[in-house]
């Protein structure tokens, strides 16, 4: 049996997130339906991570097992031909039998787009977080350094996820501003439920002056979600890349 | 009576273009309905130029006459509050009675986005022209210089428009590539029907090797639409800015 790895881009606007669920349009289900159509098998795919409703991906990763004899690199075009235009398989390759998109992943990179302008945006309305007030990027940059390292990030996790081990490692967190667009990029070995969106919301609260820029260490140590900032909305978030041992 | 000038951004994906027409959803009609709701008048707006179905704008300009006493700069937020999210008034100001968005315009700037990658894009599917084959940017840049100047651009006009004077002046035409994205920007005193899209299609045909890079002068002089390249699709086109005497 062959194990095929896919790299996937999607516009999450009109989906109820990645994970399959009854009566909802999800990215996982659309991809499973598409592959099943191609291979005439009943396909289940394993995603590297779930993304919420409205969240986008440029480099989501998933794998599936198949008996189909299609050359691995041809899968992408075959699957794209039956997928809705909102989902694109950008790469397909054959991997070891033991490869597992979730358990084999060693890290992830997310990016987050903020549209910082008094007036809203139409072209980026589904692809960014509109912040109409001024935010101090330097304060946000200063605060961002305190996220780097291995910590218990329980304060930056939404309740309702069953995860027990809340220790994660953040390797980098960068903030760039160009005209009205602020791009926040964060890399780490894994992320808790809503962790990137709460980090972004906390940085925005610091940029706005609602939280002090030297409070990140204290918030982490408190292990209390209420001490962190708000949860930034989903439409600014992009799963950029999933990393694996090479 | 006051004359109010609006600067307008829109996502043209779900509209049948700018110009009002029966039974179709158009940008002009949505804006007129919105302003009429605010001012309780029967409002007609004058746009700087029509954009086709699927074409976007960052800096479309329009003006309208009103007796309403709302401060000019407040119009934008008032109108946005009743407009669909796909249209945003980014600026509103009071102008001389004689100001006319079309006749007072001295020039326009358009940009065009190409997504040049073997595999399609989901995130930019409505915002770029997907070209899956290789295009030679240097050939396109060489050819672009021959568009600069004042010429009869009849070869770069779609049939069906009633325009008699087909002489236009192009001031600049730049091509930039960053990763998979090619951005073409063009400024001029005015553009014929589909002119930017035919210029882009011709440049793409040159980049692909279907047309030679030194043929632009010949194509212009021939005054024959059949000698130019294909018409690039609407979703890559953005009306960036309308210029006026200051």
Image (cartoon, coloured by chain):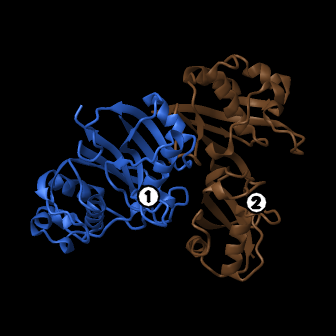
Chain colours: A blue, B brown
Residue at 14% across / 59% down in the picture?
A165
Residue B204 vs A132, above or below: the answer is above
**Which quadrant is the C terminus of chain A positioned in?**
top left
Residue A149 can be seen, yes or no: yes
Image coords of residue B80 (percent x, y): 58, 71
- Badge 1 density bin: few <14, some 14–19, many ≥20, Cα 10 Å: many
Image coords of residue B85 (percent x, y): 57, 66
Residue at 69% across / 20% down in the picture?
B210
Residue B11 vs A162, above or below: the answer is above
> Which residue occupies the foreground of this view, B112 or B3?
B112
Image coords of residue B236 (percent x, y): 62, 43
- Judging by the rendered image, the residue that carries numbered circle 2 is B100
Q: What element carries label 1?
A: loop
- Judging by the rendered image, the residue that carries numbered circle 1 is A128
The subunit letter for the residue under badge 1 reads: A
> Which residue occupies the foreground of this view, B128 or B20?
B128
**Which quadrant is the N terminus of chain A positioned in?**
top left
């Amino acid at each position: 049996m062959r194990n095929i790895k896919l790299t996937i881009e999607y516009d999450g606007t009109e989906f109820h997130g990645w994970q399959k669920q009854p009566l909802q349009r999800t990215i996982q289900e659309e991809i499973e339906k598409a592959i099943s159509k191609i291979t005439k098998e009943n396909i289940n795919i394993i995603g590297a991570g779930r993304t919420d409703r409205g969240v986008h991906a440029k480099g989501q990763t998933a794998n599936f097992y198949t008996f189909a004899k299609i050359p691995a690199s041809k899968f992408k075009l075959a699957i794209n031909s039956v997928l809705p235009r909102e989902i694109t398989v950008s790469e397909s390759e054959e991997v070891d039998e033991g490869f597992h998109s979730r358990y084999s992943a060693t890290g992830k990179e997310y990016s987050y787009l903020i549209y910082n302008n008094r007036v809203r945006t139409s072209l980026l309305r589904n692809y960014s977080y509109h912040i109409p007030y001024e935010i101090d990027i330097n304060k946000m940059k200063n605060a961002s350094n305190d996220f780097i390292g291995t910590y218990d990030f329980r304060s930056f996790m939404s309740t309702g996820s069953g995860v027990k081990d809340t220790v994660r490692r953040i390797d980098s967190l960068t903030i760039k501003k160009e005209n009205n667009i602020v791009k926040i990029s964060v890399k780490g070995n894994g992320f808790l439920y809503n962790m990137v969106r709460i980090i972004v919301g906390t940085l925005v609260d610091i940029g706005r002056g609602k939280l002090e820029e030297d409070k990140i260490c204290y918030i982490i140590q408190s292990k209390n979600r209420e001490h962190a900032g708000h949860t930034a909305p989903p439409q600014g978030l992009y799963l950029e890349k999933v990393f694996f041992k090479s």
